[in-house]
Structure formats: C-alpha cells, structure tokens
Image (cartoon, rainbow, N blue to C red):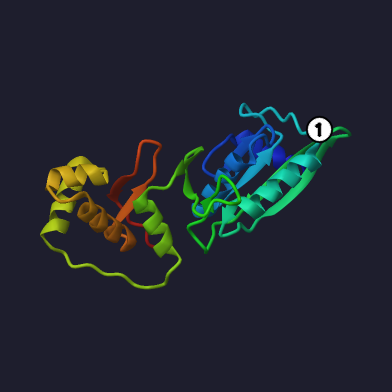
C-alpha cells in the first residue's frame, strides 16, 4: 500500500470496512475493531488518521506498530491473521495500516488483558464495532461449518413469518412478546432460520434486528 491508496481509503470515510485511529492509546480497545472486521466482511485499520479524515501521521510509528502487534498477539482469540505496513508521509511522520480478511475461524474474541480467559466478540455495523449478541455469536460459530441445517415449518415458524410480514423487522424480545414464547425458544427459532438463510440478522448498537433475507438475483 502506498500514499495514493491511503488517500483513496481516507476519501471514503469510516464505514463497514474502514476505521481511522489517530494513534494507539488503548490497544485493548483498538483490538475490538480488528476482531469486528474478522467476524464480519474484513477491513482496514489506518493509524495516523483523525476521525475527520485529516492525515496527521505518527511521529513514533514504530512504537505504535509494536503496541498494535503485541495486542493482536496477546488480546485476540483465536489470534487474528493480518497484513500490515508503514507508509511514510515525510521525514517525521508515517501512517500504519492493518488489513484483516473475513475469517474462517469465527468468532474471534477481544480480551481486555492477556490473563483474561474469555473475551467478547464484536461485529461491524456501518462505521461502528458492536458487541455480538448471543444470537450473533451462534450464527458466527455455525458459519465456519459446512453442515447443512434444516427445519420443520410448524406453528411457531408460521407465527414468526406472520410477525415479520407485519413488522418488517423484529428483535428476539419482540418475537417473544408477540408469540408468548419463552425468550430462549424465540431465540433458537430465529437463529435456526438465519442459519438456513430464511432470515438475516442485522447487528445494531441498540440490539439485533431480524428480517427476511433478500433473494439474490439470478445469473
């Protein structure tokens, strides 16, 4: 990657696949962005770029790079695979970049300390990295399997279809409330229908939304 490619990414602004950081002050928080990329559709972290797109660069880029790679080694489980590099702006300033591909080992978790046994999974939604819900985590776990799933279309599934036709989108809690089902049962049904490509799960900062999965165009 060179400065032209950096500027091209910056012009796009932060989005589902691009994140800016001015510098690495808290590697334990920055690691969440990389985990979210790996758990979603991949992406690029640019360090030395302000949120407003100002390419300020890093004066001590080697130090930030050391902190970031140390965080990836110690604070991601399973450990993230990545490509990285340094692009010099001028004699005293450089940009760091970290490229993450969609992982085949989902879900990845971000730890707060190397001693922590269990971390938190994150996914990317628009320009934010949000903590994965229990339902999203289940979907991520099954996404790495080639196992074919099926379901029987019963009264509960019919009720879910009806609710979605009326509402457009539903939360797990919303379906439980409308159906009278226990929350755990409502969750199980919605996850299964997501895994069988009937529904899609949309992570947001306020919680997951489920909707019918759009049909892909033929050809």
In the visual, does 216 lie left or right of 111? left
Image x and y of residue 90, in percent: 86, 34
In the visual, does 33 lie left or right of 182? right
In front here: 167 or 97?
97
**Measuring 78% from the left and 45% from the top, which residue is drawn there?**
86
Q: Is residue 148 above or below residue 216?
A: below
**Measuring 21% from the left and 49% from the top, which residue is drawn there?**
183
In front here: 60 or 14?
60
**Measuring 52% from the left and 64% from the top, which residue is drawn there?**
104
In front here: 115 or 6?
115
In the visual, does 157 lie left or right of 70? left
> Is residue 207 visible in this depiction of the protein?
yes
Image x and y of residue 24, in percent: 68, 37
Q: Is residue 145 above or below residue 20?
A: below
Residue lying farthest to the bottom in this orientation: 147
Residue lying farthest to the right in this orientation: 91
Q: Is residue 177 above or below residue 198?
A: above
**Measuring 58% from the left and 48% from the top, which residue is drawn there?**
34
Q: How many marks?
A: 1
> Is residue 1 visible in this depiction of the protein?
no
User: Under tag 1, what secondary structure?
Assistant: loop
Tell me the residue that label 1 is attached to.
59
Q: Tell me if mark 1 has few (under 14), some (14-19) or many (20+) residues whose alpha carbon lies within 10 angstroms of its own.
A: some
Name the quarter where the C terminus is drawn.
bottom left
Image x and y of residue 200, in percent: 33, 52
Image x and y of residue 93, in percent: 82, 33
């Amino acid at each position: 990657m060179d400065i032209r490619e950096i500027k091209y990414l910056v012009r796009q602004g932060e989005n589902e696949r691009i994140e800016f950081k001015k510098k690495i002050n808290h590697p334990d928080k920055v690691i969440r962005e990389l985990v979210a990329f790996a758990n979603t559709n991949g992406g690029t972290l640019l360090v030395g770029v302000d949120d407003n797109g100002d390419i300020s660069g890093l004066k001590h880029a080697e130090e930030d790079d050391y902190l970031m790679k140390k965080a990836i080694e110690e604070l991601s489980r399973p450990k993230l695979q990545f490509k990285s590099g340094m692009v010099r702006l001028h004699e005293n300033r450089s940009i760091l970049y970290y490229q993450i591909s969609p992982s085949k080992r989902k879900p990845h978790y971000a730890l707060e300390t190397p001693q922590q046994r269990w971390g938190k999974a994150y996914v990317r939604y628009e320009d934010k990295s949000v903590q994965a819900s229990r339902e999203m985590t289940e979907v991520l776990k099954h996404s790495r399997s080639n196992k074919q799933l099926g379901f029987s279309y019963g009264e509960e599934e019919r009720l879910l279809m009806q609710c979605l036709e009326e509402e457009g989108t539903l939360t797990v809690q919303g379906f439980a409330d409308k159906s009278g089902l226990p929350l755990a049962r409502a969750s199980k049904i919605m996850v299964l229908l997501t895994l069988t490509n009937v529904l899609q799960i949309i992570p947001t900062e306020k919680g997951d939304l489920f909707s019918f999965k759009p049909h892909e165009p033929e050809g």
